[in-house]
Image (spheres, rainbow, N blue to C red):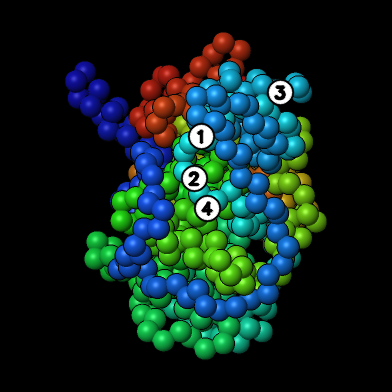
Amino acid sequence: MRKAFIFLVLTGMLLSACGTNLWGTYDAYLTPMPTSIGTVPPDPYPTPTNLFLPLSTTQAATVLPSPTDTPTAAVTPGTPRPIVYSSQSGDSLEAVALHFGVQVSEITSRESLPNTGLLNPDTTLIIPDLLSQTQTTPSLKIIPDSELVYSPSAQSFDIENYVSSAGGKLSTFSEYMATVGTITGAEGIQRIAYGSSISPRILLALIQYYTGWVQGQPKPGVDEKYPLGYHDPQYQAQYQGLYQQLRLLVRELLGGYYGWRDGTLTGLTFPDGTTLRLAPDLNAGTVSLQYLFSRHLNYAEWRTVLYPENPETGFPAFFANMFGDPWERARETGPLFPPDLTQPTFTLPFEVGVPWTLTSGPHPAWEEQSAWAALDFAPPLNDSPCESNDWVVAIAAGQIVRSEGSYVVLDVDPDGFEQTGWVVLYQHIATKDRIPVHTWVNAGDRIGHASCEGGTATGANVHIVRKYNGEWVAAGDPLPFILSGWTAHAGSQMRQGTLTKDGKTVTASPVSSRESQIIRQSGE
């Protein structure tokens, strides 16, 4: 009996879900979140950091209109008064409360507020002003959310054509990747953009800003092994070359964006140790850039890059000079999350009557820093722990818009664009029997087999995640992942959590346990 028990535990461990970093091994020390917020000196002495190349702040660019900076008015100490805040796309009551440092119960409105779910854009909220005496970052928004993520704003953006026509070093650049062979610079940008769902425009702008490789002449002194300046000895051997350097940059963009979105990031810590509270009325795209640059520049330099005295210098103007007015594109595409957004009807991603297990509750969609948008399911064991005979199925009708390298991407709209509407990504789908791209499917149609292929996995499983308009959507609150009526709930730590339905609960576990087993019933 003891041997049998040990065997069950060991084989069950093979069912554990994929690693949170789907590029490879996660380096936990790369992007720690600040844990305490202090005060930045009025004019801290700029101290260069050896992690990043110095940024040029002298290149002039045409400045286009952008939203007005509306800082919170000062309040007499001891008599805080309520302030009026207009909700933004993607806001939830819980995240807003964390941004403003208040309790959810302290937020009121003349409008009806939902107990759960996203707030409709432009909902008027009355919030106690508890941060009036706290120094914060500028509240001027510098980039829309839709320009930071791979959204409808960039669905028709042709990376190859832009890079080629720009005529810089990137247009003739290539590098070798062990998994796919030699790729061009444009192909690398496309792979990073699809994988992380970060806009290719922001990636190209940052490459140009640091290296000059996109347009004109390369900047002198750029190390081609570490072109974006990530050359810390702890990971320099693993992250050589432009593609690998972009992976590190993307982690920091994701950390700022989704840390703000879920309210876990409320302040910045600069390289010299000084800290600064984030202005509570910022948007996620702006915080993403604020966070990225705060990782490598002290406050005075950081402010010069993002909020220069001369508005024709700095990164926001640099971006507009390359790609035009981002706020105009945002007005054309509208908010990422429209009013009254709900998830379509989705089924469990496996066939009726087959006992699968929930091996991971809500956890990062892509890199460790992205939204806890993914769930992992493992099929029954067979002769090979990494090759399942059981089928993964489409959770809704739509079009397969990507099928390569262990990924299958289902466009639920279906307009054929991965950047628009509801999209479902499957990871670890075996090459054998994998559904071809451009196939139209109905809910329940077979798309492939769970496997260990792609990323990090210790046993056959499927990693499934939602996006809406290019943004990873958290699997728990405020817009929970619902599969065949089973509602996902996040745990206190990533990978924990449950699925619940009609008083029944399935608890995530990396080993095969009765509590983690789920069987799709007829009609689900």
Q: Which residue matches tag 2?
A: 136
Three-letter amino acid code at the position of disc 2: Thr
| Amino acid on which disc 1 is placed | Leu
Q: Nearer the viewer, residue 237 or 99?
A: 99
Find the distance from the CA under tag 1 to the CA under tag 3.
19 Å
Cα distance between the residues tagged 2 and 1: 8 Å
Nearest to the eye among marks 2 and 3: give it. Answer: 2
Residue carrying label 1: 131
Report, in whole angstroms, how far the alpha carbon at label 2 lies from the one at label 3. Answer: 25 Å
Tag 2 and tag 1, C-beta contact below 8 Å:
yes
Query: Which residue occupies 51% across, 17% down?
Result: 505
Query: Which numbered disc, 2 or 4, marks the residue that appears first in the sequence?
Result: 2
Badge 4 is on which residue?
A: 288
Left or right, 439 with respect to 47, comes to right
Kindly identify which residue carries mark 3: 109
Q: How many marks?
A: 4
Q: Is residue 451 visible?
A: no
The residue sitting at 36% across, 58% down in the picture is 44
Alpha carbon separation for disc pair 2 and 4 = 16 Å
Q: Please say if the residues under marks 1 and 4 sit with CB atoms less than 8 Å apart.
A: no
**In the current view of this chain or complex, which residue is farthest to the front?**
76
Disc 1 packing (10 Å; few <14; some 14–19; many ≥20): some
Q: Residues within 10 Å of mark 4 (few under 14, many from 20)?
A: many
Looking at this view, name the residue that lies furthest to the right: 332
Q: Residue at x 80, y 56 (%)?
A: 332
Camera-side residue: 101 or 148? 101
Secondary structure under the numbered disc 2 in the rendered image: loop
Where residue 422 appears, as percent x and y from the top left, is 70, 44
Reply above or below: 402 against 314: above
